[in-house]
Amino acid sequence: MTCEILLVRHPETTANVEGRLVGRGSAPFTRTGRAQLRRVPRKVVHFKPDVVWSSPLERALVLANAAGRACGHEVHVDSRLMELDFGQAEGMTFEEVAAAGMAFNYRDRERPVAPGGESRADIERRSSEFCRELIAQGGRHAVVTHGGVFRAALVALLGLASTDIWAFHIHNAQLATVRVVDGHGTLERYVEG
């Protein structure tokens, strides 16, 4: 069975520009983000998805809804596509986290990144579970999500090690097309939107 998945990261927000850790919160699009919001749906249409999926968070859902309308598809929302929960570090910059004396850890896979937040293992588990379900369905799926889920999904789809999550720079409006044939994933395209 063949499955093709187009991963799409949401457009640029003010939090992205300011270096703020925004997981479950929200931030408005920048001028660049609004331009990406106009461009990227056409790229999703070009992919010709059977289904459009989205995180329920606004910065992804706005893009997914625009892409869904352009493709003539209803958007399917899945909470597993939400960004990493940063817990007490939500909305802070790395400098603010350090100034607050807060423990912050991206490197340890099993420990929460910040008090009250998720671990990398948490986001990897939910991302890989979602990807396995898409592969079992087959077909063409456009998935609009966030940087953390995008990274974790690429690692899962390509059969890479957990530490390989750092091998990709995920720009805002980044697009990656992965083709999975008989359980083996290949990165077909990796472009900025």
Image (spheres, rainbow, N blue to C red):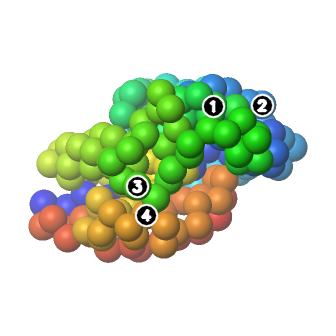
Q: What is the CA distance from the residue labelled 3 to the residue labelled 1? A: 19 Å
Residue at numbered disc 3 = 108
The residue at which mark 1 appears reads as 90
Residue type at tag 3? Asp
Residue at the disc numbered 2:
28
Callout 2–callout 1 Cβ contact below 8 Å: no
**Helix or strand or loop: what does disc 4 sit on?**
helix
Q: For the residue carrying disc 2, how many other residues have a C-alpha within 10 Å: few (<14), some (14-19), or many (20+)?
A: some
On the image, the x and y values in percent for residue 89 come to 62, 34
Between the C-alphas of marks 2 and 1, the distance is 16 Å
Pick whichever of labels 2 and 4 is earlier in the sequence.
2
Q: Earlier in the sequence, mark 2 or mark 1?
A: 2
Q: Amino acid at mark 4?
A: Ile
Q: Earlier in the sequence, mark 3 or mark 1?
A: 1
Residue 70 - label: none
- Type of amino acid at the residue the image marks with label 2: Pro
Asked whether the residues under the numbered discs 2 and 4 touch, taking CB atoms below 8 Å apart as contact, a structural biologist would say no
Q: What is the number of the mark on residue 165?
A: 4
Label 3 SS = loop
Left or right of residue 158, residue 138 in this image: left
Front position among marks 3 and 4:
3
